Image: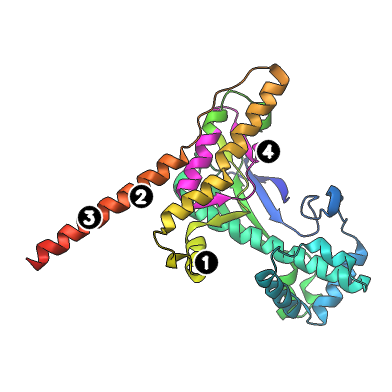
Amino acid sequence: MSVVLDVSVQNRHGPPIHHVLKLYDRRFGSCLRDILEDKPAPYTRENEAAFQTFVGRGMIPGSLRHLKQRNDTEQYAVAAWQFLDEPNRTEGLAKYEATLWRDCIKHFECEITAYNRLADLQGKLVPRMFAQISLSSIQLATIPQEAASYFDVKGILLERIDGYCLGDLTQIIQSAVDAAHEINKRGIIMKDCAPRNVVVDGQSNTPGIVDLAQCRFRDELVNRWYKNGWNEDEGWDPDVEYWEQVGTASNPAAIGAVMVMRIQKITGVKVDVRYPDYEAIIAGTRRAKAEEAVAEKKKGAAKSS
């Protein structure tokens, strides 16, 4: 989805150090610009002219507010490509590019949040994040200062893993499955979890999950559940709900099961992979909560006596 560049950083005391620069740029990325049937809508001068005019007229804030209102009230989120069907072609192109800009910002903020929350796993199960950057895709002198942010291209500088994709490997699927579970245990559910997003270090054979731009975070989910009144249901527990959601998303199986099927199809060999036992995790969560409640009750009784 994002543009990924190999960046060479000069080193006074040795050879250059190579990092990965991941850019969230609405102009590029076939997946980002996909429309129906996986046909990308290419970035063109016409698109850019429509977008710049839209920005110059001060239309983006209102357009994005309206889009948010629709997403808050409609069952399915509005996709950028839907604006390409608008009767006014120029305005449709402008709204399409504006929505892609919003999507890029959301993915950037999501990935930054995920890396920060996975600080203890950086350099182990996910790459190290070294810096955030912001570039401009246009000459700033040509646009009003208040509109400059709409032409920002956000990016993150990451550790480069010299290895190969999990799609080419069969021996370390279990490690990748366990890595996905570790991320889930830290309150992060990945919406885009697949073998293509796992890179294996060529020296240590350690898998790293490299795309965290589309995630759901436990604390944000819990806030939404309380806002929607889920806590009013008898016996409802946010920790149990979280693990039920994790089980539904099944990040570990999204990596492991796909690879097992591929290997079996190609070689006829079935690889045994262990997956998290979500029923046991939920049962353990309920048991711990019950024990905690009993302990609190005893503590209260002791104080009153």
Q: Which of the numbered marks, if any, corresponds to residue 294?
A: 3
Residue 235 colored in magenta in the image: no
The residue drawn where x is 65% and y is 48% is 192
Question: Marks 2 and 1: in contact by CB < 8 Å?
Answer: no
Q: Residue at x 62, y 24 (%)?
A: 170
Residue 9 visible (yes or no)? no
What is the three-letter code of the residue carrying label 1?
Answer: Arg
Give the magenta-colored segment's residue range: 176-205
The label nearer to you, 3 versus 1, is 3
Element at badge 4? helix
Indicate which label's residue lies in the foreground, 3 or 4: 3
Q: Which residue is mark 4?
A: 196
The earlier-in-sequence mark between 1 and 2 is 1
Location of residue 280 in the rendering, given as x and y in whole percent from the top left corner: 41, 40
Q: Is residue 68 above or below residue 290?
A: below
The three-letter amino acid code for the residue at tag 2 is Arg
First in sequence: mark 3 vs mark 4: 4
